[in-house]
Image (cartoon, grey):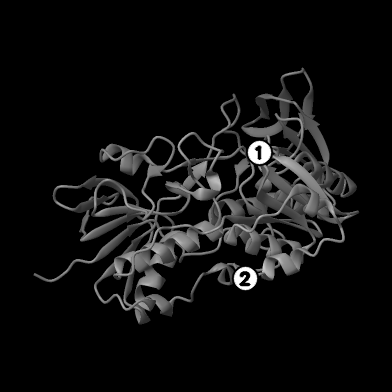
Amino acid sequence: MSPVGIVVAGAGQAGFQLAASLREGGFRDPITLVGDEAALPYQRPPLSKAYLAGKTDQEGLFLRPPGFFAEHAIAHRPGLRAVAIDRAARLLQLSDGGHLPYDHLVIATGARNRPLPVPGAELDGVRQLRGLADADALRAQIEAARAIVVVGAGFIGLEFAAVAAGRGLSVTVIEAAERPMARAVSAEMGAFFRGAQEAMGVRFAFGAGVTAILGRDGRAVGVALADGRELPADLVLVGIGVLPNRELALEAGLPAEDGVRVDAFLSTPDPAISAIGDCARFPSSFAHGLTPDGTVRIESVQNAIDQGRCLAARLTGKPAAYGALPWFWSDQGRHKLQIAGLAGPTDASVVRGSGSAFSVFRFRDGRLSAVESVDRAGDHMIARRLLTAGTPLSPDQAADPGFDLKALALQRP
């Protein structure tokens, strides 16, 4: 019987990387990518930055040109959703009523934006930013916008705010926490980016809850806050986090409480099904002390790419546990934030450097857990080496401007 190969439910960064790495690793059986968007697999990070600012076009987003898929015998099925898994028959049901048989199924369904649960959230002018269609709609609406409100001071909200403020538009960011990026960075780094955004003209409302989007004739005209204030807005961007697309796994009887549960080799309890990318929850040594069971779900390009490569290696006979260091970045105006590792809200902070270029070294139980750097790419690369190798670094050493971090990072184990 001829092999039916590998089917990947999801054609984002993780799914694409898996397919490309399988071919690079010599895999010869069929590979099918099922994606619910009409476009070729593309990069998402530029959507809130270069693409929104008009510095790159749609073609510049594509992970590979159209001919790549035919040249590498990767079947791309765009505009289709994977809706159900028949594990016994090894069939993936699609939204058009068709089925795809598989020898191995990979769930790479990603995540979706968390909805804003208030009246008026459905009004015209209320947008989210996750995919290419969202970015296209925002590009069209931002041209005519006069007053913009961003709900959520996370990476996406602040990146969008920087682009909008750079166009000279009125921008107010509403955040339920007391500082920007509260779940992602230290208080010191949050304070810096608050100041940088305010210098661009962005206004903030912290500790504020949204109770309604105000509308007139079907369009958004303002945002009502819990403290009674009403902010004018003809464009509202909602960026309050994401939810993993876990339903496909959950309905197939696989564990997927907050993401599809996988082991260190990215396999679910069904040996014929794996999961990777934003939808997957996996064990990580870098999450020690952050979660009760040491598992984590990470939304990043790095994680998607590295998991795609790791799983491709296993499926081509070279299994290895996934242990890549998580790292992230965010471009906001003229400043670049880079993060290596995973910090918790109670991790101690040590600042190295000053002014508009510095790093915050985070420590958990006396051990280096993460490093946040703004406009200090050298610190970021050193941090990645230190954390990957598990090289000991004390808070006193990090705080000492004379201590040679590069020499420490280059030491042989």
Between 209 and 183, the one lying in front of the other is: 183
Which residue is drawn at the image coordinates 45% and 50% (left, top)?
110
In the rendered image, residue 298, in percent from the top left (x then y), is placed at 52, 48
SS of the residue under disc 2: loop
Assign a secondary structure to mark 1.
Answer: loop
Q: Residue furthest left?
A: 1
Give x and y (percent) for residue 41: 46, 65
Where does label 1 land, which residue? Answer: 183
- Disc 1 versus disc 2: nearer the observer: 2
Q: Nearer the viewer, residue 196 or 117?
A: 196
Snapshot quadrant of residue 49 = bottom right
Q: Residues within 10 Å of mark 2 (few under 14, many from 20)?
A: few
State the separation of the CA atoms marked 1 and 2. 34 Å
Task: Return the residue found at the far front.
Answer: 413
Q: Residue 389: percent from the left, percent from the top?
A: 58, 61
Q: What residue sits right under mark 2 in the picture?
A: 412
Question: Percent position (x, y) of residue 170?
Answer: 83, 43
Quadrant that contains the C terminus? bottom right
Please say if 68 is above or below 307. below
Q: Residue, x 65% and y 40% (percent of image)?
A: 365
Which image quarter holds the N terminus? Answer: bottom left
Q: Look at the image and tell me whether residue 12 can be seen.
A: no
User: Is residue 236 visible in this depiction of the protein?
Assistant: yes
Q: Residue furthest bottom?
A: 71
State which quadrant residue 36 falls in: bottom left
Q: Amino acid at mark 2?
A: Arg
Amino acid under disc 1? Arg
The image shows residue 127, relative to residue 117, as above or below, that is: below
Disc 1 packing (10 Å; few <14; some 14–19; many ≥20): some
Q: Quadrant of residue 250?
A: top left
